[in-house]
Image (tube, grey):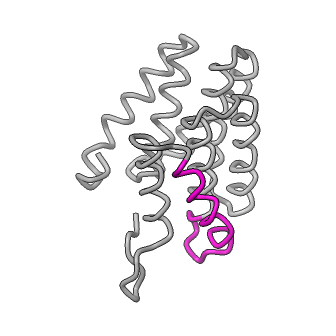
Amino acid sequence: MQDWREDGAPSAVVDVERLIVHGRFGNASMALRELALHLPPLEHSLEPEAWPIGLYARACLMRWAGAPRVDVVAAWPRLESAAAERHLPAWVAIACAMRARTRLETGEPAAAMGDLARLDLQALSDEFDSVTGFRLLDATATAFSRIRVNDRADHARALLEESIGNREPIDQ
């Protein structure tokens, strides 16, 4: 993950990552309000993953802030379409896996299975060593575990374990 621009200023991705951490372990509602200020410039950022991570953060923060699950489920397709437009297949898969997780929380296992059926982890194996790959494998393992598809969950967990040594210590 690039954390500083060439001019020495913090990147937009770092700001969003900070808000994700603040929302997860602090005040999700406040982080969501602050993220709303960052989203418009992220859409036009030169960093390819800035807009997808902004949309990912928005959906996660909505979930942690207690937004209705229906609204959270509706936030994931926006990430999916933005990632598809930018030709970022790992982010498309993250959107599918996270939407499946949220649908499982709303009691929609059939819809969740439809989302998970679209995932092809082998086709995305080049991404596993990155933070994006970690998000993908974590979301996938959790979703498969919740619907008790243990062999797929174990496979995703094994891929996580294999790739962890290739990430920087801060990402682990």
Task: Kindly give the residue lying farthest to the top in the view shown.
Answer: 148
Quadrant of the frame with the N terminus: bottom left
Residue that appears at 47% across and 36% down = 137
Which quadrant holds residue 48? bottom right
Magenta segment main secondary structure: helix
Q: Position of residue 67 (x, y in %)?
A: 66, 34
Residue 42 coordinates in the image, percent (x, y): 62, 68
Residue in the picture at 72% in, 34% down: 73
Instruction: Give the quadrant of the C terminus.
Output: top left
| Along the viewing direction, whichever of 111 and 17 lies nearer the viewer | 17
**As drawn, 62 above or below 36:** above
- Image height check: is 168 above or below 113? below
Q: Is residue 142 visible?
A: yes
The residue depicted at 63 percent of the width and 43 percent of the height is 59
Give the side of residue 149 with respect to residue 163, left or right: right
Percent across and percent down for residue 131 are 42, 51
**Which one is nearer the viewer's eye here, 121 or 68?**
68
Q: Is residue 142 magenta?
A: no
User: Where residue 150 appears, x then y in whole percent?
Assistant: 48, 13
| Residue 49 belongs to magenta span | yes
User: Relative to residue 158, is residue 113 drawn left or right?
Assistant: right
Q: Is residue 90 visible?
A: no
Locate residue 65 relative to residue 103 in the image: left or right. Answer: left
Residue extent of the magenta highlight: 30-50
Q: How many marks?
A: 0
**Looking at the image, is 88 positioned above or below residue 96?**
below
